[in-house]
Structures are given as structure tokens and as C-alpha cells.
Image (tube, rainbow, N blue to C red):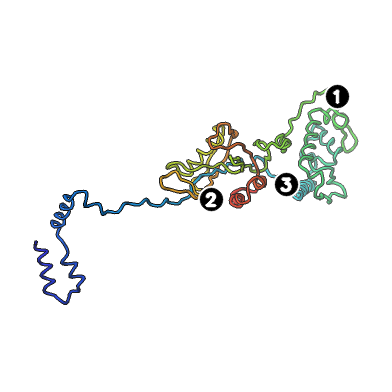
Amino acid sequence: MNAGHRSARHLASRNGASICRSCREKTLSRKPYSTAAAATAADNTAGPASSSHIPPVTATAAQQAYQVRAGVVLSRPPLITRDLHPFEKAFFLYQRRLNERLALPFTRYFYVKKDTPADAEWKRKMKKRLTPARDIGTYNAYGNEGWNDEVLMGAQESEPEWQVERLLEDAEAAVSGGGIGGESGGAKGLQEGGQPAVPEVAAKAVVAEPVERPMPRVTEADKKGDLRSLDRLLQRTLYLLVKNKDGRWMFPDDQIVGKENLHQAAERVLIQAAGINMNTWVVGNAPIGHFSFNFPKPRPGLRQNVEELGGKTFFMKARIMAGQANLAENKLGFTDYKWLAKDEVEKAVTLRYWSNIKNMLAER
């Protein structure tokens, strides 16, 4: 018995009734380290028979969890300006006609020199459409009806296509020599007093040069209804949708593997799903939305002793700058793809999927 053990017994015997029974038992039953070590050694020498009373360890229940998946909202931004509303078209034409009226105080010789080919061209245009402006229709800003420069909504003069055609006609007439060597210009051009504007010269045959036409807003892919082409709906944002092995349309996604983050997983999904023939850019490191789903019944997970109830997909925003999707060698089981606008995506996906992704998509 060491000194510490004796002092504990001495204090317990001196205080007597002032120490409760439970505290006295704890104090007296405390063993020093040497005593505990001797007891352990005695247990070890007893052999395996002494450990037969230890109950067997039972297996713990499987932990329930959700898959963490990374999805990619890959989009092609608009390539041209949006289509104008009929009111906007009519208002812009009104502004151009108003500008024509505001230019009245200036004589035409403020813009062109008298008795020159440019002066003859000015007269030709004035005779044909009553105004030198090329895209405001037949409008006489110098007459009594000059104040009536408004146009009704839906009028053909307010349509951009009609204005482009008028500009092209003007350009083709200029390169063909109709304004300078033709009957309305050159020798036949007259001054206000009726005198010839320029000396009479012999008309020369001029070879018309082709005028470059602007690219149309409606492409061949729009006319054919090719949903796989990126050359359609140039004024809208298109999103890449793929068809999985169950026949449902969705954004490309896959389960996160190892220690990769959402950004790394999104880049891997793009390569494994749509091939390497695309120049893409994953924007940022934070997701723009998520979608949760449950499996029909729990399934074993990738980790040991983990049971997966469903999945949680976090969507990353990405842009395509060049290239095209190719599912020939995809490793995620996708069978088809489409480039769709927002309203077309709504018709392709399920109602529950749409309710989770609609706020992530742009209206145009």
C-alpha cells in the first residue's frame, strides 16, 4: 500500500459520517497504477478461456446518402440582335423621316457640289422617290404633306428586309451607271432653271458589278428545322440537351469521382459526353442551380457501407465558342443531342425537371 492509498483511507476514516457512502466507496476502491498493471498481467496469463465472455461485435447498418452529381448548362449566346417589335420598327422609321424634315433648312449644295456627278445622282433620286434618303420610302419632306411623317404599324416601309432591298437597289443602280450616264443623270440632268447641269457626253456602256448582299437573319438550318445545328435561331440563346439511355432529355451530367470539384467534374462531363471537338469555357466555380431526384429503391454506393437513396445534381454554366458536339465516342450512355432555345427546352424535358431548371435559362 503506497502513501497515496494510505492517505485516502486516513481521510475517509477521520471524516466518517461527513462523507457519503458512494464517495467513500469510490475513494477506497481506487487502485494505483501498479495494482492495475498487476491485475492486467494476471488476466493475460489466464489464457484465451477468460475472454470467452466478450460478446461478438455486430455489423453496423448501412449509411444512407445521396449521389453528388455535376451537370453542365452549355449554351451558345445570341449572334445577332433580337427581332424588333412592330411598334419599334414604325418608331425608328418615324425618327428617320423626322430627321429628313430637320435637314430642310440646308440646300443640297451643302452636301454636294453643283454640276457634278454627285449632283446628278441627287436629282435622280429626288425624281424617283421624292427624297434623297434611301430607306424611308416615298416621302416628300418639302411638300404640304411633309408633316405627315408617321407610319402605321405593320407597314412594309418599316420592315428591315424591305429597307435592305431598297438600299441594294440604290447601290446596284449606282454601279450600273444609271445615275451618271443614264437618262435621269449626266447629260439629261437639269438645273432648277431648266439649263443643262453638265455638258452632254456620250453614254458609255458600264459593266455592272455585283453588289454584296448582307447575310440573312433566317438561315438554312432554320428553314430545314435542323435541331442539331448551331446556325439556327441566331437571335436566341441555344442550350445543349442530350438523351440518356432511358430516353429522357436532360443536360449532360455525371457523378463526381474522387476528389474532383464541380468545375473539374463539369469539364470532364463535357469531354466524355460531347467529345473533344468543342472549344468550351466553364464559367466560375459556383453552381447556378440544382436538381434532386430519388431512385425507385436504394442502391449500393461507390463507398463501402453506403446506401444511395438518389442524386443531387449541381449545374455549372458553360459557353461554347467553336466546334460541335459529337456523341460517337461518349462514355456516359447518351444517344442523341439537340440545340434548343428556352421555350423548346420546356417541351422536351419532363415537367418536374423543367420546374427546377427554368430559372437558369435566358429568355432570348
Which amino acid, mark 1? Answer: Ala
Confirm or deny contact between disc 2 and disc 1 (CB under 8 A). Answer: no
Q: In this view, does 90 lie to the left or right of 291?
A: right
Amino acid tagged 2: Asn
Q: Quadrant of residue 21?
A: bottom left
Q: In this view, does 245 lie to the left or right of 43?
A: right
Q: How far across and how far down the image is residue 269, in percent?
A: 52, 39
Residue 29: x and y in percent read 17, 65
Mark 1, Cα crowd under 10 Å, few <14 / some 14-19 / many 20+, is some
Mark 3 and mark 2 lie on one chain; the one further toward the N terminus is: 3
Q: Residue under circle 3?
A: 84
Please identify, in this view, whether the residue under mark 3 or under mark 2 is nearer the observer.
Answer: 2
Kindly identify which residue carries mark 1.
Answer: 203
Residue 339: image quadrant is top right
- State how far apart marks 2 and 1 are (Cα): 83 Å
Q: Which of 112 and 38 is in front in this view?
A: 38
Describe the element under mark 2 as helix, strand or loop: strand
Q: Nearer the observer, disc 1 or disc 3? A: 3
Secondary element at image label 1: loop
In the picture, measured across the screen, residue 144 lies left or right of residue 25, that is: right
Of 127 and 248, which appears nearest the observer?
248
State the separation of the CA atoms marked 1 and 3: 44 Å
How crowded is the residue under tag 2: few (<14 C-alpha within 10 Å), some, or many (20+)? few
User: Which quarter shows the N terminus?
Assistant: bottom left
Which three-letter amino acid code belongs to the residue tagged 3?
A: Leu
Residue 105 seen in render: no
Of badges 2 and 1, nearer the viewer stands 2
Image x and y of residue 214, in percent: 72, 34
User: Please, what secondary structure does the residue beneath circle 3 have?
Assistant: loop
The residue carrying mark 2 is 294
Seen at 83% across and 37% down, the residue is 125
Disc 3 to disc 2, C-alpha distance: 44 Å
